[in-house]
Amino acid sequence: MNATADPLLDLRGTPCPINFVRTKLKLEQMSPGSLLEVWLDPGEPIEQVPDSLAMAGYKIEAIENRSEFFALKVRRPAVS
């Protein structure tokens, strides 16, 4: 099993809180236990979205700084 997330949601250029809403909607469409990679801009998006997702019950697995954007890996809980 590889650690590469699938699917990918590219939200670069998407303002808060729309990026959080789109991420949450995507996670709700995925099967329980699935991993989603989300690309977010630096600044407010990467500061706000992971915290909001964690408060909503999602597990943040990784945040990678890819110089021009951040890759956030978030898992939908196995049981909702």
Image: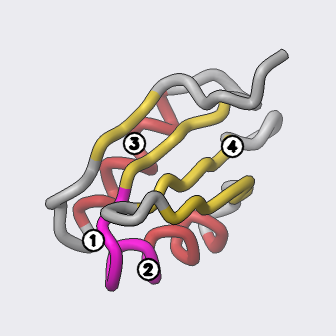
How far apart are the two marked residues, 3 and 4, measured between alpha carbons? 13 Å
How far apart are the two marked residues, 2 and 3, measured between alpha carbons? 16 Å
Q: How is the image coloured?
A: secondary structure
How far apart are the two marked residues, 1 and 3, measured between alpha carbons? 12 Å
Per the image, the residue denoted by label 2 is: 48
Taking the image as shown, residue 57 lies to the left or right of residue 27, namely right
- Which comes sooner in the sequence, label 1 or label 2? 1
Q: Are marks 1 and 2 in contact (CB under 8 Å)?
A: yes
Q: Which mark is residue 75?
A: 4
- Which comes sooner in the sequence, label 2 or label 3? 3
Q: Position of residue 6 (x, y in %)?
A: 55, 24
Q: Secondary structure at mark 4?
A: strand
The N terminus sits in image quarter: top right
Q: Amino acid at mark 4?
A: Arg
Task: Characterize the local packing of mark 3: few (<14), some (14-19) or many (20 or more) Cα atoms within 10 angstroms.
Answer: few
- Which comes sooner in the sequence, label 1 or label 3? 1
44, above or below 52, in the image: below
Q: Amino acid at mark 1?
A: Pro
Per the image, the residue denoted by label 1 is: 17
Q: Quadrant of residue 33?
A: top right
Q: Secondary structure at mark 3?
A: helix
Q: Which mark is residue 25?
A: 3
Q: Nearer the viewer, residue 12 or 68?
A: 68
Residue extent of the magenta highlight: 40-48
Q: Nearer the viewer, residue 70 or 50?
A: 70
